[in-house]
Image (tube, rainbow, N blue to C red):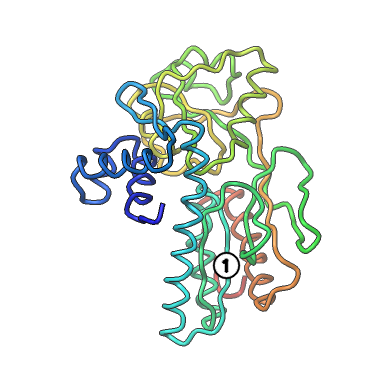
Amino acid sequence: MRDLKQLQYFRSTALAGSVRGAGARLGTAPSSISQQVRALEHDLGLELFVRTGRRLDLTPMGRELLGEVEKVFDALGGLEDRAADLRVERSGRLVIGYFSSAGTRWIPDLVAYLEFAHPELSVRLELTDRGIVENGQDLQLVISRGEGLDVPASMDSELLLVDPFVAAVPRGHALAGRGSATLEELTALPWIDNDDYTSSDGRCRQILVDACRVSGVDMTFRHQAHDYRTALDMVDRGLGATILPRLGLVGTGDNTAVLQIVGPGLERRIHAVWCRETPVADAVADARRALRDLVAEDSGPGPRRPVTASA
């Protein structure tokens, strides 16, 4: 457990789904990675992976351990960032938590704005798909399934966006010529999974599960892709349909059509959550205003424009 290399190899294997993929990520021989992962399993007395076809999937114990390992690497990242701040004599830091699709759509513009408006601050980003983080983040983006969001007494929140789920289907399919489809109609195509089990706490998956149950639809996946972009690429190659939040529609190809889904409960809510007491309160307030502008631009017609210093 004291060997960070073992934890790094375990984490990369979990993310890649194979020791070969982990080796490609790290530039390390797959045999070395396999040896270190087996040593970690032996030291812990736990089975961390189970083979499913050609993939290595995490066991329930492995999934729980991965969450703890992510905390270790987050702490190391914080240490490295703080050292960098001290080197450039930056005395303040704004920590922003976000989930992956928000990161793709809003975070680059938000950080660019904050760099201009608050050059004295460093901005640290933390990927936090597991709900509200009570300590260590000044501002965070959080997903909820319902209208309400319970936040700690030391925090406030505001609703930024109601994000409906949509279906991406191959443009050559008969459904592609329509503006909408039901879940039952979408079963005419193979379904492609897009759930990232390594970073999600299941909110988006549960929304789809509940909607399928209400509609009497058997949720069966033909293909597994663990992120939106890969699933959309598979749709563009005619392999099936995928269902995802509208905010995740980044990089859809020419051979993909997007349909609204007719059915109950297929939407998620995105909130900004922030600490009331923080030394960077002014920057948090500016970041919230910028986020509101970004959401408005993203929801309106036409291309989205970057946030400017007047936001």
Instruction: Name the residue carrying label 1.
Output: 95
The residue sitting at 50% across, 48% down in the picture is 100
Q: Residues within 10 Å of mark 1 (few under 14, many from 20)?
A: some
The correct choice, above or below, for 117 with respect to 56 in the image is below
Residue situated in front as seen by the camera: 193 or 162: 193
Point out residue 6 in the picture as x, y percentages from the top left corner.
34, 49
Q: Amino acid at mark 1?
A: Val
Residue situated in front as seen by the camera: 56 or 38: 38
SS assignment at label 1: strand
Q: Residue furthest bottom?
A: 89
Q: Residue furthest right?
A: 153
Whether residue 306 sits left or right of residue 265 in the image: it is left
The residue sitting at 48% across, 59% down in the picture is 74
Whether residue 80 sits left or right of residue 184 in the image: it is left
The residue sitting at 66% across, 48% down in the picture is 270
Point out residue 296 in the picture as x, y percentages from the top left corner.
63, 55
Whether residue 133 sits left or right of residue 240 in the image: it is right
Point out residue 38 in the picture as x, y percentages from the top left corner.
31, 38
Residue 119 in sight from this viewpoint: yes
Point out residue 34 in the picture as x, y percentages from the top left corner.
26, 39
The correct choice, above or below, for 133 with respect to 168 in the image is below
